[in-house]
Image: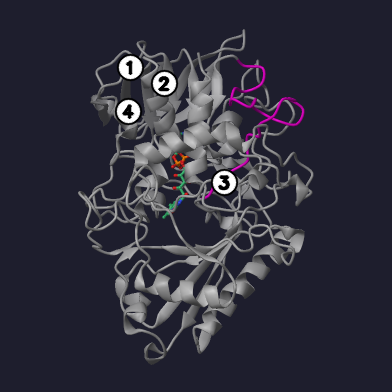
Amino acid sequence: MTDIRHIAAAACDYTNFDAVIVGSGPSGSIVARTLAEKGRRVAVLEYGGLVSPGAMHEPHQAAYSKALTSNGPADGNPWTACCVGGGMQFYNAITFRYRQSDLSASQYLGTDMEVDWPINLRDLEPCYSQIEHLLEIGGTNGHSSYPASPRGVMLSEAMQELGMGPKNILLAIRAPGNPGGCVKCSACDELVCPTDARASVLARNILDDSGLPGTISVFYGCFVNRVEIRSNGRAEALECYVPLSSELIRIPVERVVVCANAIQSAALMLRSKSGHAPQGIGNESDLVGRGLSFKISGYSVGHVDPADCGSDALASHWGPHATVYTDEFYEHNDVPCRFGGLIYEANFHSPSKNVGRVRLHYIAGDEPWSHNRIVLDDAADREGIPYIRFEYRNSENDRERIGFLADRADEILRHLGAYRIEREPSSHAKGSSHLHGTMRAGCDPRSSVVDSCGRVHGFTNIHVMDGSVMNFAGNSNPTHTIMANARRMALSLE
Ligand SMILES: Cc1cc2nc3c(=O)[nH]c(=O)nc-3n(C[C@H](O)[C@H](O)[C@H](O)COP(=O)(O)OP(=O)(O)OC[C@H]3O[C@@H](n4cnc5c(N)ncnc54)[C@H](O)[C@@H]3O)c2cc1C
């Protein structure tokens, strides 16, 4: 069984590992598992701690450093969540495969960066299938689909009547009534599932080396500050800061795989300046941190008189955050750029807040521009680590695309008889839990940072395998693709 312990409790000389992975979120965990399947001894270094069943999301961002945003204050979020298991501990289990258009979006979008991925959908397909098997995704491999909620059924009917082709979302949640199935203990959003019905890297056997030829050891409470490089360009060690003891420790590496999220991974590379990499690792072409993509998204909330609809559909909500969606506008001639995204049910995370209200979420991938980026500030946080600064603004195309989806969502709510519709303001410049694009993948070091398998150009033993390497963010929720792509890249390692 995987050894998971605070780094202060690790009696270990750290020289026994074939690979060290930075970050224990879904990308780092699937890379660890894939390497352990190949018989490798893997260490995973994680800054955050263990979270308890039922824990809420907010403290696992708030306790850690914020990012500075373009207009000055430290009010940006540079984490999905900082904890063992990463953002997936709190996620909504919405599971989509990307489409070929997500990987070749240049047919729709034109920016000053390479938008197309260096791989095709068929390269991801076997890994999608393996992840679906490991996570027990409903509707795949004989696992029961999670049924639509009463609100979802009402929304599906409205979408159908408006010609917007409703569908049930595939969820990484065991359906009620099945062994270990969901007991609908809450409105499932931004909390750690207390029963493990919802998948995470800990609740399924992703971060578990039982029965594998290799081993996985997770050391948490340890912030990886820099990658140290020898003069021959090989990574030699990681300099790590342990807040508990205020100590800097040095962990030797044979191979390092960075899976810290698209903000933190780029920041680590930028902090790792040396004589061999004076601008930071992989940054000869000034590309590290550029192309930052947060997704564009928003919410519309319709206030509906319960007398107008079936009462179950407008009562308190217990169960998944979202069960139905429409992808009618994913690629559609009426959408600006002909490239839209998804609209889906998005219940409030407090069951009673849903009474008399219907909430919809809309998301799409944002255009990656080189001026959208993270940089390191001169100022440092309380741990002495340079602040990350976001420089991010949406393009005109993106504003029009998300505006179109918002109008369609409002149409659905009006069709349901909403007497008032409110749009919840989005503050994309302050971050997102969908992080992509800062370490772009391709063949040419002048336009990309890593190759198609995540190896940093010019380095033999430094790899990046998280959302950083996604050249276009994709028009749907990313975790399934982040994991499938991470597994594909990890399988390519010797
Ligand atoms: C509330 C919420 C709901 C979501 N719902 C969905 C959903 O329904 N569907 C979906 O597809 N996606 C969803 N997401 C997004 C999903 O969580 C992310 O896509 C996913 O977690 C990304 O995985 P990752 O491994 O690349 O990064 P992360 O999960 O962010 O993991 C990175 C890990 O690295 C650690 N780390 C970072 N820097 C360092 C460092 N220097 N040293 C040591 N450790 C470090 C972090 O603490 C973190 O644990 C949701 C996110 C949130 C927060």
Residue 446 sits in quarter: top right
Q: Nearer the viewer, residue 365 or 211?
A: 211
Circles 1 and 2: CB distance less than 8 Å?
yes
Residue 35 disc label: 2
Tell me the SS state at disc 2.
helix
Q: In the image, 350: left or right of 96?
A: left
Q: Is residue 260 visible?
A: no
Q: CA distance from mark 3 to mark 2?
A: 24 Å
**Mark 4 sits on what residue?**
219
Which tag, 3 or 2, sits closer to the chain's start?
2
What is the spatial separation of the Cα atoms under label 1 and label 2, in whole angstroms? Answer: 7 Å
**Residue corresponding to mark 3:** 98
Give how far across and how far down residue 22 sits, in percent: 45, 29
Q: Tags 1 and 4 in contact by the CB under 8 Å rule?
A: no
How are the residues colored? one colour
User: Dot 2, crowdedness within 10 Å: few (<14), some or many (≥20)?
Assistant: many
Spot occupied by residue 407 in the image (x, y as percentages of width and height): 63, 74
For the point 21% across and 49% down, which residue is it?
A: 180
Element type at mark 3: loop
- Rendered residue at 65%/15% (across/down): 276
For residue 2, above or below residue 202: above
In magenta segment, residue 31: no
Q: Say which of marks 1 and 4 sits in front.
A: 1
Q: Answer few, some or many: residues within 10 Å of disc 3's Cα (few below 14, many 20 plus, some between 14 and 19).
A: many
Give me the C-alpha separation between circle 1 and circle 4: 17 Å
Residue 232 occupies quadrant: top right
Query: Dot 4: within a 10 Å radius of its alpha carbon, few (fewer than 14), some, or many (20 or more) residues?
Result: many
Mark 1 against mark 3, which lies toward the viewer?
A: 3
- In the rendered structure, which segment of residues is drawn in magenta? 434-459
Residue indicated by mark 1: 214
Determine whether label 3 and label 4 are within 8 Å by CB: no
- Nearest to viewer (mark 4 / mark 2): 2
